[in-house]
Amino acid sequence: MLSEYNSLQKDFSRLLITSDGYQLNPAYNKLLGLQKTMTKACGRAFIEYDASLSKQKERVSHGIHLKSKKGKHKGLPSDGTVWRVSVKTLNFLLNGLLDYRQTIEHPCMQRCNELRGFVRGNTANTTVGSIVLTITDTLKNTLIEISKGYRNPSLTQIFLLNNFHFIQKRIKESGLLSKDIKNSGFVSLYQKLMDEAQDKYSSNSWDRALEYVSILDSEKILKRCEKKPDGSLEPDRWAKASIKSKFKEFNERFAKQYEDQSVWSVPDADLRSQIRNRNMKKILEAYEQFYK
């Protein structure tokens, strides 16, 4: 639609240059009417695209990963990787939409009621930026909604982490942040979303294993220990059994988390390293503190 509108603009300009006043009027009126019609159609096309993105919530089979006859996933990715619709949406915005920046920013397009209504309410600096913010916001809300289809709450957060990181990274690489959405707070919003997802991921996975090496009840164990002449502590039978049980439960929970997460996917190397380092730091600190 934008390509056709762009061609029409060129034809319109050519007509104005080559035609004399007598010949111009009928053709001018026809092209002007066609221009208005196509402008409205472009505005409605953005609205329909955004609506179809929102409808993905209904199309995804929550918790079930079905394949069509062509072998493509209809549902959620079973390993929590970046959703195919996220990839398609960002490709549309950054590989397709930006090629028609001049067309979208044309004064005739700016006067389109459908387009103005579609992008109303965000803090972008340009119409292109407004379209990007509106559609990525719909994608964000759709991701949050469909992520509830995972039965494992930790995998839910891995899915969100992958997708939020993907969106933020693609937008950063596009150059939109320097002008179009400079003051929108886009980066800080997605950083906050990723931090929240990381915290929820930890609380639903490794934190459950760390409960067994918590020092919160260490006072109870210490009271059952006898202080020896050399200053060391000798636990009684109950304390020994309690400590042994804690390590056993921790090892079992740790092994279970490792088994579950070994089939999950974090395709971005930087994000994968960030998650791994945060996990290692948290686990090692808690384990070492309890061990001492």
Image (cartoon, rainbow, N blue to C red):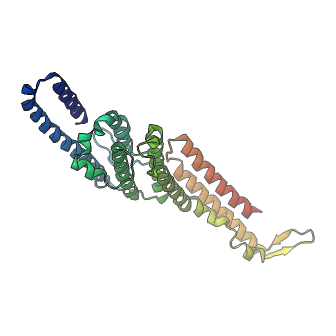
170 shown above or below 206: above
- Left or right of 172? Residue 232 is right
Q: Nearer the viewer, residue 234 or 13?
A: 13
Residue 115 visible to the viewer: yes
Q: Nearer the viewer, residue 99 or 211?
A: 99
Q: Quadrant of the C terminus?
A: bottom right
Q: Nearer the viewer, residue 15 or 155?
A: 15
Q: Quadrant of the N terminus?
A: top left
**Residue displayed at 53% across by 56% down:** 195
| Image position, residue 127 (x, y; %) | 33, 44
Q: Quadrant of residue 282?
A: bottom right
**Residue displayed at 22% across by 28% down:** 10
- Left or right of 256? Residue 243 is right
- Residue at the right extreme of this rendering: 229
38 shown above or below 161: above
| Image position, residue 275 (x, y; %) | 57, 50
- Left or right of 117? Residue 159 is right
Please count the marks in the image: 0
| Image position, residue 188 (x, y; %) | 50, 53
131 shown above or below 214: above
- Residue at the front extreme of this rendering: 21
| Image position, residue 90 (x, y; %) | 38, 41
Q: Quadrant of residue 96?
A: top left
Residue 79 visible to the viewer: no
